[in-house]
Amino acid sequence: DTEVTQTPKHLVMGMTNKKSLKCEQHMGHRAMYWYKQKAKKPPELMFVYSYEKLSINESVPSRFSPECPNSSLLNLHLHALQPEDSALYLCASSQDPAGGKTQYFGPGTRLLVL
Amino acid sequence: GENVEQHPSTLSVQEGDSAVIKCTYSDSASNYFPWYKQELGKGPQLIIDIRSNVGEKKDQRIAVTLNKTAKHFSLHITETQPEDSAVYFCAASIGTNAGKSTFGDGTTLTVKP
């Protein structure tokens, strides 16, 4: 099973709302990632969790708050977002955080901020 | 940091023809080069990858070649089919640079029936 699942598939939120994106994998992977992807662009790395600890934060604004409750789950908490934050948010996982490991992507959550 | 350039940005081929997408990278320390296919409304899916100790890898109709000296790698799709239509991304990463892959800007491949 090489599946990464993400919920919800679509999300519309106002700039004052608080919402969360969820990601789950059951491959025993110990590294999990959040990416942001704008239309017709490659994915941009936001956060990396290594063995449930935040290891990389690519200078992401504090209105995005990641959380890794356990080795299978990854959340992205959203608060006070801006319209320019509208994008496809992708979760990925890999066996471990060392470079050169295959990353498996979920289908993404398409977020629209009004 | 690493820079990956991908060409062409769009590619249109007739069904049954071959398609080639090329990427160049800047950091000679990069040693892992995956290719992803992203269909509309879906996340990127790994289709093939190659490591720096290998020059070529093939999986049915898909092959990847790597030239470490020239710092470029290419995706070759033979006998293209309409279902190959998608956006393809190349990427490069360094074994010691945990979690960070640099992606190319993508190639939109259209296979005409």
Image (spheres, rainbow, N blue to C red):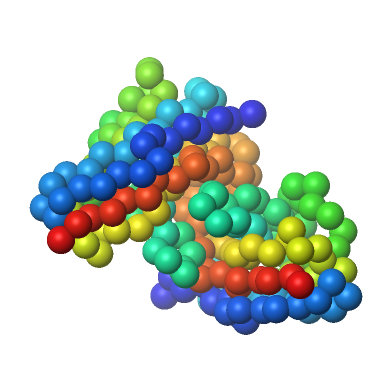
State whether residue A97 appears in this view: no
Furthest residue to the top?
B69
Furthest residue to the front?
A114
A2 versus B101 height, above or below: below
Q: Residue at x 51, y 71 (%)?
A: A107
Q: Residue at x 76, y 72 (%)?
A: A114
Which x, y percent locates residue B70?
38, 19
Q: Residue at x 69, y 64 (%)?
A: A86
Say which of A30 and A40 sits in front: A40
Which x, y percent locates residue A99?
56, 44
The image quadrant that residue A29 belongs to is bottom right
- Give left or right: position of A59 versus B27: right
Which x, y percent locates residue A28?
55, 70
Which x, y percent locates residue B93?
53, 39
State whether residue B113 appears in this view: yes
- Give left or right: position of A75 versus A10: right
- Give left or right: position of B88 versus A86: left
The image quadrant that residue A61 belongs to is bottom right
Furthest residue to the bottom?
A8
**Total numbered circles:** 0
- Give left or right: position of B42 versus B84: right
A59 versus A66 height, above or below: above
Figure quadrant of the N terminus of chain A? bottom left
Q: Residue at x 52, y 69 (%)?
A: A106
